Image (tube, grey):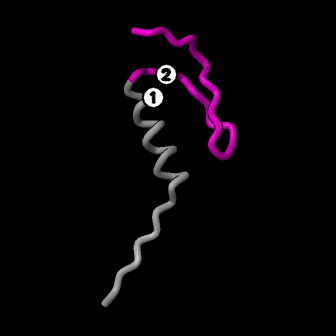
Amino acid sequence: MKLFIKFDINTICSLFLKHNLDQHNVNFTTLGFGEIEISDNLDAN
């Protein structure tokens, strides 16, 4: 038996980005394919 696993790269990247931005309490909005808007000012800390 062969199993073929399809990876949806856009979904994986979006979930990874959401997880990391949520960890750092960054407010953002997903605008479209591969596009986000960050609502906060970002600092180096």
Mark 1 Cα-neighbour bin, 10 Å: few <14, some 14–19, many ≥20: some
Tell me where the magenta segment starts and ends, as one range: 24-45
Confirm whether the magenta stretch covers residue 36. Answer: yes
Circle 1 sits on which residue? 21
The residue lying furthest to the right in this view is 32
From the viewer's perspective, tell me whether residue 38 is left or right of residue 44.
Answer: right
From the viewer's perspective, tell me whether residue 13 is left or right of residue 3.
Answer: right
Pinpoint residue 45: horizontal percent, then vertical percent: 39, 9
Q: Quadrant of the N terminus?
A: bottom left
Residue 30, image quadrant = top right
Badge 2 or badge 1: first in the primary sequence: 1
Pinpoint residue 31: horizontal percent, then vertical percent: 68, 37
Residue drawn at x 51%, y 55% as measured from the top left: 9
Circle 2 sits on which residue? 26
Q: Is residue 2 positioned above or below 21 on the image?
A: below
Q: Amino acid at mark 2?
A: Val
Determine the CA span between mark 2 and mark 1.
5 Å
